[in-house]
Amino acid sequence: MGIGSRLKSNWKHDRETLKALPFRQKLGFLADYYRWVILLLLILFLLFYYIGDLVWQSHQTIDLQGFFLNDRQDLFPARKLTDEFSDYQNTPSGHRIAFEDSLYVDLDSSSEYNAASQGKLVAYIAARELDFLVAPEELARYYAQSFLLYDLEELLPASLAEYLQEDFYYAADGTGKEKACGLNLCRSRFLQDPAYDGKEQYYLLVLSYTPHTDAMVSFIRYAYNLDS
């Protein structure tokens, strides 16, 4: 008897057994005798789900991609911000906004999660797929010296740059040039959240290679509750 026939025969027998059992015992029976089958089906489901998601994403144009690092107070909920900003700038069909808030980086840590987060950040920047990042002050100052960043005074329209002047963080970037490397988000909508304890300042850094300058400016307007 082949494996398929044996499984079919066993299932017929087990099905009769299940009919005679109370609901809770049915669950226990399935967990005991079919756990590997259930696990395999779950793995296959997740595999097909992720493949389908990747195929779907490959047909979408990303209008803006950003990482929010070390968001311990959930001040930058990526899914909510993605939905809100997509509505704010009327993201068209076939396009999407890609934000992520699950990365945690500690410059003094060697943990696996820390290494994975740092590795993902560097990989996205090396591939020129990341437009901006938001990080606590210590990390922002470190990255300002490590990466090539946009001069915000050049990126932003004159009126917006003037409005945000007091929030600019000036430093020498990776080229040694002094410029407005970051934007302190202390006056942004994100840090007006009652949950914010004020213990950390968060800065927005824009990568110098980003082609999505209009969307970047739009996001900064959104962050400060300004008209699009």
Image (cartoon, rainbow, N blue to C red):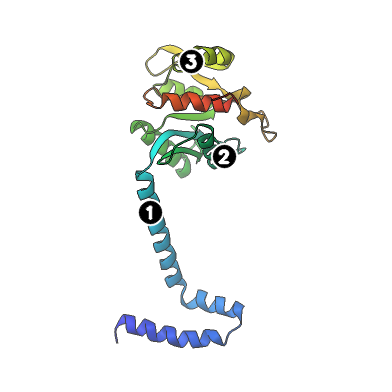
**At 47% across and 85% down in the image, what residue appears?**
14
Disc nearest the viewer among 3 and 2: 3
Is 166 displayed left or right of 109 in the figure? right
Label 3 or label 1, whichever lies nearer to me, is: 3
Mark 3 highlights which residue? 157
* Above or below for 213 versus 72: above
* Horizontal side, residue 20 vs residue 65: left or right: right
Front residue of this view, candidates 140 and 65: 65
Compared to residue 40, the image places residue 67 above or below, namely above
> The N terminus appears in which quarter of the rendering?
bottom left
Counting other residues with Cα less than 10 Å from the Cα at mark 3, is it few (<14), some (14-19), or many (20 or more)? few
Whole-percent x, y for residue 223 in the image: 57, 27
Answer whether labels 3 and 2 touch (C-beta < 8 Å).
no
Q: Which residue is mark 2?
A: 77
Amino acid type shown at disc 3: Pro
Whether residue 146 is visible: yes
Q: Is residue 89 left or right of residue 126?
A: right
Circle nearer the N terminus (3, 1): 1
Q: Position of residue 133 (x, y in %)?
A: 48, 30
- Name which residue type carries label 1: Gly
Mark 1 burial class by Cα count in 10 Å: few <14, some 14-19, many 20+: few
Q: Is residue 119 visible?
A: no
- Residue depicted at x 33% and y 84%: 5
Quickly name the residue at label 1.
Answer: 52
Q: For marks 1 and 2, give the one nearer the viewer.
A: 1
Give me the C-alpha separation between circle 3 and circle 1: 40 Å
Say few, some or many: other residues with alpha carbon within 10 Å of mark 2 (under 14 / 14 to 19 / 20 or more): some
Specify which label sits upstream in the sequence, 3 or 2. Answer: 2
* Mark 1 residue element: helix
